[in-house]
Image (cartoon, rainbow, N blue to C red):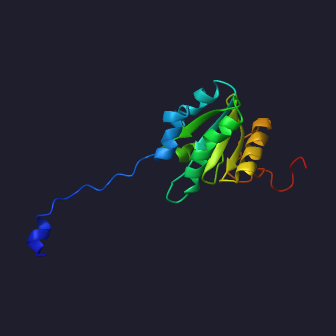
């Protein structure tokens, strides 16, 4: 093929990568989940009760996030009336994950009455997933994990109270 014929080929725009996979979108469109992000999460969680938020992650790097998106409504059906589901679009996941100390993808974030309970990272066999979800729903509210930087007293010379 000559250079002239190559130049005459139509230029196509690169295909855009969807912000959220169809399986994650299905949670909101067909399974009654609510789209949330860093700005709307507090108000949604404060509506009361147990809330489970899916942070699926990049489906190319973390394909098990798609598995969790499929299993999550099944967990909800197995535990009827126990929790509402929230989903976060890819471009908002990092901010929500940082806020709650989530460091693995995918992660289920458990909230109760607007407060942090725990996270459940990864994909699991059904029996394990169901048991861990029940445990998370029974757990007390707690403080979200920090970012892992230890605090050091200004009186590091031993003049502190210990």
Of residues 98 and 78, the one nearer the viewer is 78
**Which residue sits at x=80%, y=55%?**
156
Quadrant assignment for the N terminus? bottom left
Expressed as whole percent of the image width and height from the top left, the position of residue 143 reads 74, 39
Of residues 43 and 59, the one nearer the viewer is 59
Expressed as whole percent of the image width and height from the top left, the position of residue 9 reads 14, 63
Expressed as whole percent of the image width and height from the top left, the position of residue 125 reads 70, 54
**Which residue sits at x=66%, y=35%?**
77
**Which residue sits at x=43%, y=46%?**
19
The mark total stands at 0
> Residue 37, can we see it?
no
Name of the residue lying farthest toward the bottom = 1
Name of the residue lying farthest toward the right = 162
> Residue 4, can we see it?
yes
Name of the residue lying farthest toward the left = 4
**Which residue sits at x=64%, y=26%?**
46
Expressed as whole percent of the image width and height from the top left, the position of residue 154 reads 76, 50
Is 99 left or right of 162, judged from the image as shown?
left
Give above or below for 63 relative to 144: below
Is 156 left or right of 10, judged from the image as shown?
right
């Amino acid at each position: 093929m000559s250079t002239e014929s190559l130049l005459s080929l139509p230029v196509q725009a690169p295909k855009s990568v969807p912000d959220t996979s169809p399986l994650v979108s299905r949670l909101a469109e067909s399974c009654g989940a609510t789209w949330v992000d860093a700005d709307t999460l507090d108000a949604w969680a404060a509506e009361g009760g147990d809330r489970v938020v899916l942070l699926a992650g990049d489906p190319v790097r973390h394909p098990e996030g798609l598995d969790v998106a499929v299993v999550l409504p099944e967990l909800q059906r197995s535990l009827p009336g126990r929790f509402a589901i929230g989903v976060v679009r890819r471009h908002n996941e990092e901010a929500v994950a940082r806020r709650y100390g989530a460091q693995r993808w995918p992660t289920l974030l458990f909230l109760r009455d607007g407060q942090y309970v725990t996270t459940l990272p990864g994909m699991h066999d059904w029996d394990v997933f169901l048991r861990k979800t029940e445990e998370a729903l029974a757990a007390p509210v707690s403080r979200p994990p920090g970012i892992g930087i230890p605090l050091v007293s200004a009186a590091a010379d031993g003049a502190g109270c210990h």
